[in-house]
């Protein structure tokens, strides 16, 4: 299955042409971009972030609603929600953007960024743009996809296996 997950950031430009992270009342707002590169649709079950080892599951995914046009006799139309479409479905060769808009989600993200910035001694914006922030997407099939680079994911898995083997040797 070919599913690409990446962390997105809202930016704004200053008059000198440089881009900086956009910050609202809660703080910086990361998002998740999920691209389905397979030949069949996939269905999202959950999404979240890992910020410096702290797992944050988004309570509300705020997926875009798929709509259909309904026309009256005069040719005027309006968009209404399409009941036959599943909002968690990502069609083949399409993408979906997940933005945490819920206050509890945003508070948890900003809190984890603050704890990480105090622990590491760097600003939260630098942590947000580093590999310390990983987007995680879980499909209804149970498969998990992350924005973590492959070598880092491989190393993490090797450490998990080694720690499991150490536990078995101590138990015997």
Image (cartoon, rainbow, N blue to C red):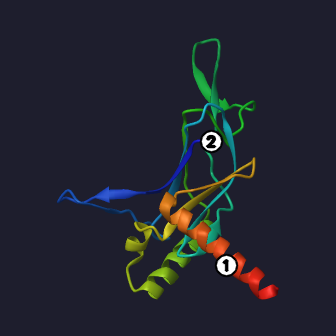
- Of 124 and 164, the residue lying toward us: 164
**For the view shown, which residue lies furthest in the right direction?**
172
Image coordinates of residue 98 in percent, x first then y, are 57, 51
Which of the labelled discs sits on residue 103, or is there none?
Answer: none
Q: Which residue is mark 1?
A: 163
In what quadrant of the picture does the C terminus appear?
bottom right
Dot 2 surroundings within 10 Å: few (below 14), some, or many (20 or more)? Answer: few
Is 86 located above or below residue 120 in the figure? above
- Give the CA separation, mark 2 to mark 1: 29 Å
Is 121 located above or below residue 30 in the figure? below
Kindly report which numbered mark, 2 or 1, lies closer to the viewer in this rendering.
1
Image coordinates of residue 90 in percent, x first then y, are 63, 38
Dot 1 surroundings within 10 Å: few (below 14), some, or many (20 or more)? Answer: few
Q: Is residue 169 visible?
A: yes
Image coordinates of residue 128 in percent, x first then y, are 44, 68
Position of 20 compared to 57: left or right?
Answer: left
Q: Is residue 106 visible?
A: no
């Amino acid at each position: 299955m070919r599913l690409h997950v990446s962390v997105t950031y809202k930016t704004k430009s200053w008059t000198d042409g440089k881009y900086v992270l956009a910050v609202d009342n809660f703080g910086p707002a990361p998002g998740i971009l999920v691209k389905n590169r397979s030949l069949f649709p996939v269905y999202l079950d959950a999404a979240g972030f890992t910020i410096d080892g702290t797992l944050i599951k988004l309570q509300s995914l705020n997926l875009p609603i798929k709509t259909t046009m309904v026309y009256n006799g005069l040719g005027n139309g309006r968009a209404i929600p399409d009941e036959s479409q599943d909002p968690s479905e990502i069609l083949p060769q399409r993408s979906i953007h997940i933005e945490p808009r819920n206050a509890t989600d945003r508070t948890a993200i900003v809190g984890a960024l603050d704890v990480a910035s105090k622990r590491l001694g760097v600003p939260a914006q630098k942590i947000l743009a580093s590999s310390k922030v990983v987007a995680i997407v879980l499909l209804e099939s149970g498969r998990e996809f992350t924005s973590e680079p492959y070598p880092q994911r491989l190393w993490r898995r090797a450490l998990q296996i080694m720690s499991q083997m150490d536990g078995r040797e101590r138990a015997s």
